Image: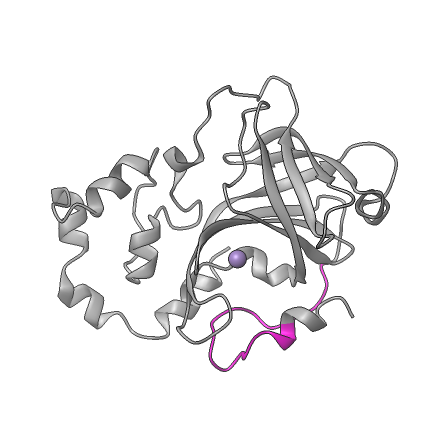
Amino acid sequence: MPLEEYAAKRHFEQTPEPPPGKKSKSAANPYFCVQRHDATRLHYDFRLEIDGVLKSWAVPKGPSLDPAVKHFAAHVEDHPIDYGGFEGNIPAGNYGAGSVMLWDRGSFQLLGDASGAEQIARGDLKFHLNGEKLKGDFALVHMKGRSKGNEWLLIKKRDDFASSGWDVEEHAYSVLSGRTQEEIARNLPARKTKLKTAGAADRVWHSNRPPKAAASKAAPAAVKSTPRKKKRTLTSGA
Ligand code: MN
């Protein structure tokens, strides 16, 4: 039961995260997503649909389109397919408490003839991403001989999508709602027009002098009047 660890860590009456559900129907066009998770430490959760679950890696520095960087990726517990559409807030006191942004999503294709399970078992998983932000060939490579056994590296391969100096923090907006991490944490409504680059807006937001557009959206009355169940509405928006 690959989702036992996922379920054991969570109390589904306390968190808007989805409980383990039914498996996906087809793996012909498997799903991938990346969630930007502002928990104890900010990290990116990288997930690939393989064998009916989301195989998952926590990447502290996030993915990159720069082939020169190899970012550490901790292999973590499988997540249910439904988790791939989740965006919202995990309440304080719960596992992973903090805001979760659906940072990227799309489909992927495994590269080579070996199955996903075989590639994970051999510690060398190669795939092509068709995301909104991440595109092209990538590899996840297991660092053998390390102490914990869950240490991998996420690496962009050199191809037409590779981009030297690419900065993940210049793309810090939700592909689901267009919101910044701060806006998700405050339960502010989805933006009508998606941000092109939210990095700059994010920094302004933190400066106590939000731009006019952001200020009007951040009216305290709007925050207070947001019904609690809004959280759940947002989580199912994929
Ligand atoms: Mn996480």
In the displayed structure, 224 sits above or below 40; it is below
- Name the residue nearer the viewer: 41 or 195: 41
197 w.r.t. 50: above or below = above
Q: Which residues are magenta?
A: 7-24
Which coloring applies here? one colour
Residue 21 in sight from this viewpoint: no
Say which quarter of the image contains residue 186.
Answer: bottom left
Residue 149: % across, % down: 74, 52
> Quick check: 127 left or right of 221?
right
Residue that lies at the very extreme toward the bottom in this rendered image: 13
Q: Percent position (x, y) of residue 194?
A: 34, 41
**Residue 29 at what x, y percent from top left?**
71, 43
**Number of on-image labels:** 0
Residue 221 image position (x, y, % from top left): 14, 67
| Residue at position x 70%, y 52% in the image | 150
Q: Nearer the viewer, residue 200 or 27?
A: 200
Asked if 184 appears above or below 221 in the picture, the reply is above
**Residue 218 shown left or right of residue 119 in the figure:** left
Quadrant of the drawing holding the N terminus: bottom right
Q: Is residue 106 magenta?
A: no
Please name the residue shown 58% across and 42% down the image. 106
Please indicate whether residue 131 sits to the left or right of residue 218 in the image.
Answer: right
The quarter of the displayed image where residue 8 is located: bottom right
The dominant secondary structure in magenta is loop
Query: Which residue: 43% across, 76% down?
Result: 93
- Residue 112 visible in this rendered orientation of the protein: yes
